[in-house]
Image (cartoon, rainbow, N blue to C red):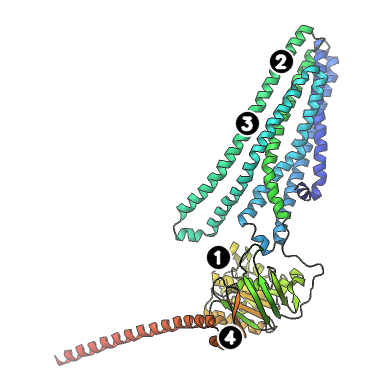
Amino acid sequence: MISTLMQSIREYKKAAIATPIIVTGEVVMEVAIPFVTAQLINTIQSGASISEMLPYAGILVLMALASLCFGIGAGVTCSEASCGFAKNLRHDVFAAVQRFSFANIDQFSPSSLVTRLTTDITNVQLAYMMIIRTAIRCPLILICGIIMAFVMGGPMALVFVIVVPILAFGLVKVVRTVHPIFRSVFHKYDALNESIEENITGMRDVKSYVRQDFEKAKFGSAAQDVCRDFTKAERILALNTPMMNFAVFTVFVVIIQFGSWLIISSKGTLLNVGQFSALTTYGFMILMALMMVSMVFAMITMAQESAERIVEVIETKPTIENPEHPVTEMADGSIDFDHVTFKYSAKAENAALSDIDLHIKSGETIGVMGGTGSAKTSLVNLISRLYDVTEGAVKVGGVDVRAYDLDFLRNNVAVVLQKNVLFSGTIKENLRWGNPDASYDELVEVCKLAQADEFIQGFPHKYDTYIEQGGTNVSGGQKQRLCIARALLKHPKVLILDDSTSAVDTKTDALIREGLAQYLPETTKIIIAQRTSSVEHADRILVLDNGCIAGLGTHDELMRTCEIYRDTYESQNRTGAEEIEDDSTVEGEESKELTAAADAATEEGGVADER
């Protein structure tokens, strides 16, 4: 774990090394000051003149200034090293997440990753800052202070040798007790962040269903869990302070009592006032160093669990990686599924796809239909290698997708996913995800094909309109059309539309399909849809049922041979026919009512004429 974290120090290594060196200088000055002070006190006691005291005073001032300069220097280098380390660590964790395959992403919840990138890294940063400064400073003061205490006080310094192991034992006991608590609390942090994320993301639903009180209670419960565990841990850590204070006061009582008696009884021959003053100062330094060590251990204990969670992300091996000698040429857009079976994990009991044997010619348009959970999305995810097959092989252009360079493959297999995502930025910036070098005219062309140009022109800033995070300021249909346009800019060999026109009307859907056929005649197009009208004009239609092929053929062929497709088509068209019939019935009844009213008016007019 430590070796993995150290790799994030990189260019801040000099600052990290300089800090302990400067801290050592600071400690030397601080430990030397009481020794010189003792000499000054003895000189004053012996009745020295001011001229004899001035050299000691000058030395003390210089040592104090040197200690100050060392302290400032250590603070600067420590801040540079710790902040730089945290910056690199965030970069490394984020880069690791970017390398994840979909299978890796499934292992970590978004809220957990956010906690690791923020709270956990902050904890590790604070611990690192303490390690390179305080954790060096305190042991040095402890060792040097005990040595100087023996030099100045002789056997009296044994009191420190006795008390230090006792305090160390208590400290270790406290640390071991709180570590499991901190391990638990960070998992609860994930639950707290997840509650916040769900609430903010689903705010419209929360308000629509009037569930604000429920969400408040849910958040309050998660916050209370975190508070309860932290309180328990802090309560145990708080034992350090009274334990240290008791040791400090006990040691000082012993030193003052025995030291005073020794000075008086020996008349300064065994212990003089200067030595006694230095011994008292060294005792204070030693015990303060012990208190600081306890704080360092507490911080490291808290950061240990954070460090393990961070390293877990960094060391997670992507389940999908580039081959040793990747292929960077694609002959065409043909797709072959050779007896493919796929499971989302090795532990899964049931396969998402079972023995799929499918061969698609380059330039062909394939419709994919099936009920919810029939594995339509799972099928197309294998083409761009978002997941790897469990058995069999998927080939594009006659080459196994596992042999391609990942970036090359995904640039040639464009996917418009079922859940369309737009990122904060202008419409131009979002579209250029498909091609960073696309000209303005190219943007307009693909937007016209995706039936997006019309509504874009209606915006005040047109293509410079700012899209909010997640595309919240555009409708679902507009978002889908922008995502289709973005994919078209890749000029891919294979284009996959995963139910990506579900939020547009049938007329717009037909225009989009017509535009795709004209703009990308040689591109293989796979259209996943729930409406038969979206796929009935495809070259062939694939029907999936529970991860197996239930039918494959043209619309007419499937109407004869595939019961699932026929039932779907008839139910959708029956619904449409019934609506038309209902409209006709209503119009007929309204016509009869109008006729009857007209006849009644005519009869009344005739009676009036007769009168």
Which residue is identified by label 1? 473
Q: In this view, does 351 lie above or below 245?
A: below
Q: Position of residue 551 (x, y in %)?
A: 59, 82
The residue lying furthest to the left in this view is 611
| Disc 3 and disc 2 in contact, CB within 8 angstroms | no
Give amino acid for label 4.
Answer: His
Which percent across, then down, holds residue 92?
74, 54
Q: Which residue is drawn at 61% across and 35% down?
A: 236
Among the two numbered marks 4 and 1 on one chain, the one whose residue lies closer to the N terminus = 1
Q: Residue 256 carries which label?
A: 2
**Above/below status of 64 relative to 277:** below
Relative to the observer, which residue lies in front, 269 or 403? Answer: 403
Q: In this view, does 60 lie above or below 46?
A: below
Q: Name the residue under label 3.
A: 239
Nearest to N terminus: mark 3 or mark 4 = 3
Name the amino acid type tagged 2. Answer: Ile
Q: Which of 90 and 399 is in front in this view?
A: 399
**Disc 3, SS:** loop
Residue 397 bears which disc, if any? none
